[in-house]
């Protein structure tokens, strides 16, 4: 079931092929005869999660996929500094009227092509120079390389924030990045059998064919990333994917079963976070090293932004608890709890694919509650026309007295005087407006004049207003509901998300 949920989180074959078609077209344009770049054999390859097979669909279905690409050149003009290389690539993109219209403002390192809204993705293109021996090394097995050879896989890239951006023509002084070395390392770590051997080229230059089957490590990373998304919504300080991916890959012990791999990875991840002394800071700091660049610390922002470190450890402890509970559940309980951890859509798709729908006693309906509570007289009714064309669902958690996150399921009891957080996800195309309704019931709320029930425009800072924060003040059965309004019509409405508050 976990493996099938991860498969449902994956991007679709149609999305995958669209991206491949688009970046192949860009590569042809950059290398065509007469291009100023053609002497340097430009090609474009994916990097990041698209390359290593751990990409997941956005939590908000209308959000764009962010596809990271490398524009790899075998050389450059003798007088070219970083600026010249970057603008040679940008200039060639602008030579095509369509790409010129799609091109966003210059980024620090990349050029970004923003595709039509219907495509729902954009491509970040990183100009880069390959080192001597780069292509020869691609034929090797990653396991057979020493560190100096791994370093030769690195690219030299552009960054306009650097002092030598416009002047230094010596590429050895440029910023170094090694996305293909990282991908080869990850694919090496993902091997279930040590008898299997792959060339680096097979790892980092895949044919443009959609792979439906994934290794257990890839599925584990996808599940962990979605659990993170559900837990933190649009929080900019949520744990970053490269740290989750790297620690999971280090902790993976070649288990063939996704559930076993997930359980073991979560127990071992923390042991791969180092403490290193920083002479510049004169103190010890947390260190999550880049496996192909020992000088790079993926957790370098933790010291400056302590919220990031705090959130990572909070997420890791919550993930351990959630998955331990999930793995102890029967099928019906696992179905119910999985929806809180991964979202209703992916879990329902998994159940359909597995053909176990009839074994789940809960089925697909929302639990029913006393009509006297749901039909409270002070509950405001929607003021817009309601024409439901899309979906919106709510996920929630609260922080207990120890500051620990606890997932809300609609059945657990929330203590008084703690923060409650709701995150809504929807497939309504942007733009839209978000409205929330918080309804309090019970004697304590009535006695203290706290019988809320109004509908109001989202005032929170969450992504698109889809985050909502509340406080558990009164004992009783309460609920939250989310409305998505587009052009004056309510096109999506959630179920009542029940919150039971105790003493």
Image (cartoon, helix red, strand yellow):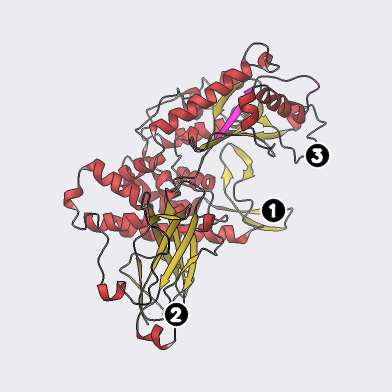
Q: Residue at label 1?
A: 278
The label shown at residue 376 is none
Q: Residue at x 33, y 70 (%)?
A: 412
- Name the spot of residue 353 as percent of width and height, x first: 25, 41
Compared with 63, 475 (above or below) is below
Compared across the picture, whether 100 is left or right of 231 comes to: right
Q: Residue at x 32, y 67 (%)?
A: 410
> How far is disc 3 from disc 1 in space, using C-alphas?
24 Å
Front residue (pair 98, 110): 98
Q: Residue at label 2?
A: 473
Q: Residue at label 3?
A: 163
In the figure, residue 406 lies in which quadrant? Answer: bottom left
Secondary structure of the residue carrying numbered label 1 = strand
Judge the density around disc 2: few (<14), some (14-19), many (≥20) Cα neighbours within 10 Å: some
- Name the spot of residue 21 as percent of width and height, x first: 49, 24
In magenta, the rendered stretch is: 68-81
Q: Residue at x 50, y 31 (%)?
A: 184
**Is label 3 in contact with label 1 (beta carbons under 8 Å)?**
no
Compared with 336, 100 (above or below) is above
Most distant residue in the bottom direction = 447
């Amino acid at each position: 079931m976990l493996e099938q949920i991860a498969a449902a989180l994956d991007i679709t074959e149609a999305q995958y092929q669209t991206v491949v078609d688009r970046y192949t077209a860009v590569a042809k344009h950059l290398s065509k005869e007469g291009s100023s770049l053609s002497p340097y054999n430009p090609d474009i390859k994916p990097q990041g999660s698209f390359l290593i097979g751990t990409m997941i669909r956005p939590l908000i279905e209308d959000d764009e996929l962010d596809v990271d690409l490398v524009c790899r050149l075998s050389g450059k003009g003798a007088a070219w500094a970083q600026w010249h290389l970057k603008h040679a690539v940008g200039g060639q993109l602008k030579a095509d009227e369509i790409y010129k219209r799609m091109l966003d403002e210059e980024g620090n390192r990349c050029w970004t092509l923003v595709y039509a809204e219907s495509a729902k993705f954009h491509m970040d293109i990183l100009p880069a120079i390959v080192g001597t021996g780069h292509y020869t090394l691609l034929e090797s097995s990653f396991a057979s390389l020493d560190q100096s050879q791994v370093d030769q896989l690195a690219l030299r890239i552009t960054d306009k924030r650097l002092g030598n951006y416009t002047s230094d023509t010596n590429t050895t002084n440029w910023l170094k990045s090694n996305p293909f070395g990282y991908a080869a390392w990850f694919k090496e770590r993902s091997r279930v059998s040590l008898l299997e051997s792959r060339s680096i080229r097979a790892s980092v230059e895949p044919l443009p064919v959609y792979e439906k089957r994934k290794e257990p490590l890839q599925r584990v990373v996808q599940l962990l990333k979605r659990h993170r998304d559900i837990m933190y919504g649009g929080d900019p300080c949520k744990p970053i994917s490269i740290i989750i991916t790297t620690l999971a890959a280090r902790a993976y012990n070649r288990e063939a079963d996704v559930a076993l791999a997930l359980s073991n990875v979560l127990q071992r991840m923390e042991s791969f976070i180092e403490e290193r002394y920083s002479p510049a800071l004169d103190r010890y700091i947390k260190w999550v090293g880049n496996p192909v660049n020992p000088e790079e610390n993926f957790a370098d922002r933790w010291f400056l932004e302590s919220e990031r470190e705090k959130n990572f450890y909070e997420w890791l402890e919550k993930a351990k608890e959630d998955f331990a509970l999930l793995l102890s559940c029967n099928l019906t309980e696992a179905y119910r709890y999985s929806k809180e951890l991964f979202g209703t859509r992916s879990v329902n798709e998994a159940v359909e694919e597995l053909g176990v729908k009839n074994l789940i006693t809960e089925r697909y309906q929302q639990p029913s509650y006393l009509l006297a509570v749901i039909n409270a007289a002070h509950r405001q009714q929607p003021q817009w026309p309601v024409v439901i064309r899309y979906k919106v669902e709510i996920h929630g958690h609260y922080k207990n007295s120890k500051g620990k996150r606890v997932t809300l399921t609609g059945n657990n009891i929330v203590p008084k005087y703690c923060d409650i957080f709701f995150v809504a996800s929807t497939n309504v195309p942007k733009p839209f407006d978000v409205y929330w309704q918080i309804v309090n019931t019970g004697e304590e709320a009535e006695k203290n004049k706290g019988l809320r029930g109004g509908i109001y425009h989202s005032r929170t800072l969450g992504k698109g207003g889809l985050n909502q924060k509340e406080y558990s003040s009164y004992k009783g059965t309460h609920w939250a509901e989310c409305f998505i309004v587009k052009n004056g019509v309510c096109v999506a409405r959630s179920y009542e998300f029940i919150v039971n508050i105790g003493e």
